[in-house]
Amino acid sequence: MEFEVIAHRGFSAIAPENTLAAFSSALREGADSIELDLQLSADGIPVVIHDETLERIAGKPDKVRETPIAVLQGLDVGAWFGDRFAGERIPTFSQVLAAIASLPKHLYLDVKPHCDWSDRQIDDLLALLLREGWETRCIISSFNESFVNRVRQRNYNFTLGYIVADADSYQQELAKAASARNTVIISLYKILLANPQLVEASDRAGVEIVAWTVDDPDIVRQLGELGVKRIVTNRLVGQINSNLTQN
């Protein structure tokens, strides 16, 4: 079985997450696809960063959504990971799209629920993706269900991702995904291992599964045996479809 290998926040095991260094490392090491986190700066610019605040990666308590883009891009978000990454910046989404133009398969967007997007801001985001040729290669997901629904209202060609973090919500989210069509389920891998019948249910509904976040080769094999083909990983970029599944 050939897996779709999705680099979680870029190749985040060897470079600081959600930075151009992490994305270029993912491309260099053979990732099929890339997952990243998206939110807005105080002045409405889409930026690529996971946390609601800047504390963990920049040592500042400020919230991303309350910080202007000029300030965000002046911060060092690489030194926490290692000295050789000192000077890495928070990239804008436009900068990332330019850097990953050669990505073989898909871009997975996890739009964080930390801030509210206006209709105009969603329109601008989709226009950017359309302009750069990502309409049929971008999976848009968010724990903010309203955001996902508003994307669907504007354009059917973007694939939607329904994120599942516990078994209780899986069937509910699967029903939504099956109804909306052109969708995937993005599930915590432990749910799938504990409830293999959910994989079968997804298959019957015609909804593919994306499993996150898998850094153990044995778990990759187990998921493959269940029929899961899309794997989000921090560490196994470059391994999953080489020697990993052959041993």
Image: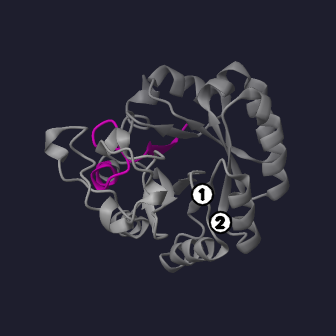
| Percent x, y of residue 153 | 76, 70
Quick one: SS at disc 2?
loop
Q: What stretch is highlighted in magenta?
A: 1-25
Is residue 223 located in the magenta-colored stretch of the structure?
no
The residue nearer to you, when weighing 73 against 16, is 73
Q: Which colour scheme is used?
A: one colour
The answer to whether any part of residue 124 appears in the image is yes
Earlier in the chain: of badge 1 and badge 2, it is: 1
Q: Quadrant of the C terminus?
A: top left
- Tags 1 and 2 touching, CB below 8 Å: yes
Q: Could you tell me residue 41's position as x and y percent?
A: 45, 63
Amino acid under disc 2: Phe
The residue positioned 49% from the left and 70% from the top of the image is: 44
Identify which residue is drawn at 78% across, 43% down. 173
Quadrant assignment for the N terminus:
top right
115 displayed left or right of 88: right
Q: Is residue 242 left or right of residue 134?
A: left
Residue carrying label 1: 139
Q: Where is residue 139 in the image (x, y as percent from the top left)?
A: 60, 57
Q: Of 72 and 132, which appears nearest the observer?
A: 72
Residue, x 83% and y 40% (percent of image)?
A: 172
Above or below — where is 180 with respect to 11? Answer: below
Which residue matches tag 2? 158
Badge 1 marks a residue whose secondary structure is: strand
For the point 73% across and 33% down, the residue is: 199
Residue 12 colored magenta? yes
Where residue 140 appears, as percent x and y from the top left, is: 61, 58
Nearer to me, 176 or 178: 176
Residue type for callout 1 = Ile
> Extreme left residue here?
84
